[in-house]
Each structure stands twice: as structure tokens, then as C-alpha cells.
Amino acid sequence: MTSDSLDKIKNAAFGIAIVIVFTITAMAISSMGSIQATGLSPVVVGMILGMISGNLFYENIPDSWRAGFLFCIKYVLRAAIIFYGFRITFQEISLVGIHGLLVSILMVMSTLFIGLFIGKKLKIDRDLSLLTSSGSAVCGAAAVLATESVLKSEPHKSAVAVSTVVLFGTLSMFIYPVIFHTGITNISADDFGIYIGGCVHEVAQVVVAGNGVSESAAHTGVIVKMTRVMLLAPMLFGMSIFLRSKSLSANTGKRKITVPYFVFGFILVVGLNSLGMISKNGIELINTADTFLLTMAMFALGIQTRFSKIKEGEAKAIYLAALLFVWLIAGGYCITKCVVTFF
């Protein structure tokens, strides 16, 4: 190995070390009681720290160190998505039965299609529309990160999309319990848990919103939410095929179906977790490590996000996310009501 190569590795290691230090900080901040009450995960805190650091200090960081940030975005992110599969089992999916599965599938598909349609009407960048829609449709920040690895879009677009998840996901924690307690939905607490699990952005937000209804609603909501997480893999397959067809129709040359290996890894890990070979403590340890990896990737994306790079048109992502939020509340209720009534 040449001295040049050794220097590159050493410099990249400095960049990775910066990411690790800030990730530890993000984990510590998110564990504080006041922060936990807001439902902000370490992943989101990591993004916020990254964006603050990037806008204040990025120009002072040596260019050679930035290879470490790119390593976290490219490789650490993929590993994190693979291990994300340890959060779900096929047995949990079966527990919610046909109702939970149908609501999850219908909400993911409808939210993605509506998001793309609205994004086109608002003339929003296609990648930003896909990132924002996937965050609303599947599992918040984790879905945005997974989608980014297929799109290979600019880092600041992912940060914008995650910001919308934080904003409207936080509102969800308060709005859904209020809707239930008004009595206007006329469905049971358990069925309302299906509604919450099929519509609220992040897992932590589902827990908070569900507990605002009842303990059983929270339990049902989390399981339904996990079925949406499972749909991350087919969503990425479909997205890759969609992007390939678009590139061919635009005569931009043949584009490979770029579904990364982590999709297969994710499915395999879910299968492994379903076998019950790993203890509960072991799973908790893996999930903590996975959260750390996701936070590393989110900080690395955040630190490369410059507010000056966010174009005026990209601010429209807030409008898109707001309209999708309305769809999740209104459309989600209608879909849940129909499914639990007729199936």
C-alpha cells in the first residue's frame, strides 16, 4: 500500500471520528427526559447537530476528511438499514392479521402515488418528492435514508425531507389522541391503533400517539407500524424499477435496476429475527447499535447540508408534506374504517 493510500485512509478516519463523537453526543441528548418526551429519536437529533455543524464549521474542515462523511453515508447507512430488520418479525406481522396488513399496504402505496402526483403539480424536484413521500409513507427518517441510497440524491434534499417528518410526525403525536377522544371516528381503541400504526411517521411517534389512546392501541399501533417498515424492501424494488423505466423513456441510456444489496440483507435479517435464536437482550443491544449507525449516517448527511444550497423550490417540500399529512389523517381514517368494516 502506497503512502498516498495510507494518507487517504488516515484522513477518512478523522472524518469518521468526527461523526462518531457527534453521534455519541446525539445519543446522550436524545436520552434526556425532556427530549424523549418530544419523541425526537437520536437519528433526528444527529441530523440537527449535523446541519448546525455543517453550516457553522464545514468550510474549516479539511477536504480530505470529508471522505469519512461519504463513507458513513454510503456504507454505514446500508449496514444500518440491514440491521433495522431486527426490529420486526414475521410473527408480529401475522398478529395484526389481514386488517393491519391491508391498511399498511394501502397507505404506503396511496401515499407514494399521491406524493408523486402532488410533487409533479407543484413542480418539486423528483428526488425530493420521492424522499418526502417515502418518509411519510413508510417509516420516517429511516425510509428517507434508505430511499436516498437508491436515488443517490444530494444530501441536503434528504435533510429537507427528514425535517418534514420531524414537523408533521411531532404534530401527529398530539392530533391522533385528540381525534379519538372526540368520539367522531366511531371505532374501537384497537382499531384506532391500526389507524395510528398505518398513518403516523416514526415508530416512537406511534408509541406516544397510541398511549394517548390506550395501552392496547399503542401495542396494536406499533405492530402495524412494523408491517409498514417491512414494506420498505418492496418499495425500494418498485422505486428502482420506476427510475429505470423513466431513464429509458427519456432516452438517457440503459439504467440498471439499482436495488442495493441491503434490501436482501434487510429481508434476511427479518427472517433470522423471526427464528427467535437471539435473546431479547441481544436484540435490544443490536437495535441500540443500529440506532447508533443510523445516527452516524444522518449526522454525515446533515453536516453536508448547507442552508444556502436549499433552493427556493425545495421549500415546497413543506407544502407537499403538509398535504400528505392531511391525506394520512383523512384518507387513513377512511381506509382503516373500510378495512375493519368489510374484511
Image: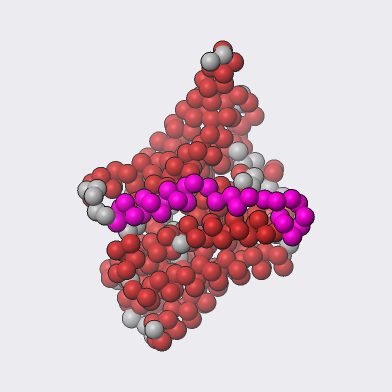
Side (left or right) of 12 relative to 294? right
Depth check, front residue: 183 or 99: 99
- From where the camera sits, is residue 116 visible? yes
Q: Is residue 186 above or below residue 305?
A: below
The quarter of the picture where the C terminus appears is bottom left
Residue stretch in magenta: 247-274
Depth check, front residue: 254 or 230: 254
Side (left or right) of 272 relative to 132? left
> What predominant SS class does the magenta segment belong to?
helix
Q: Residue at x 61, y 58 (%)?
A: 241
Indicate the position of residue 189 as horizontal and vertical percent values. Answer: 32, 77
**Magenta span has 252?**
yes
Indicate the position of residue 141 as horizontal and vertical percent values. Answer: 49, 53
Outermost residue, right direction? 251
When asked about the image quadrant of residue 2, the answer is: top right
Q: Residue at x 45, y 51 (%)?
A: 264
Outermost residue, top direction? 3
Q: Residue at x 53, y 56 (%)?
A: 236
- From where the camera sits, is residue 196 visible? no
Q: Residue at x 40, y 64 (%)?
A: 227
Side (left or right) of 12 relative to 196? right
**Magenta span has 70?**
no
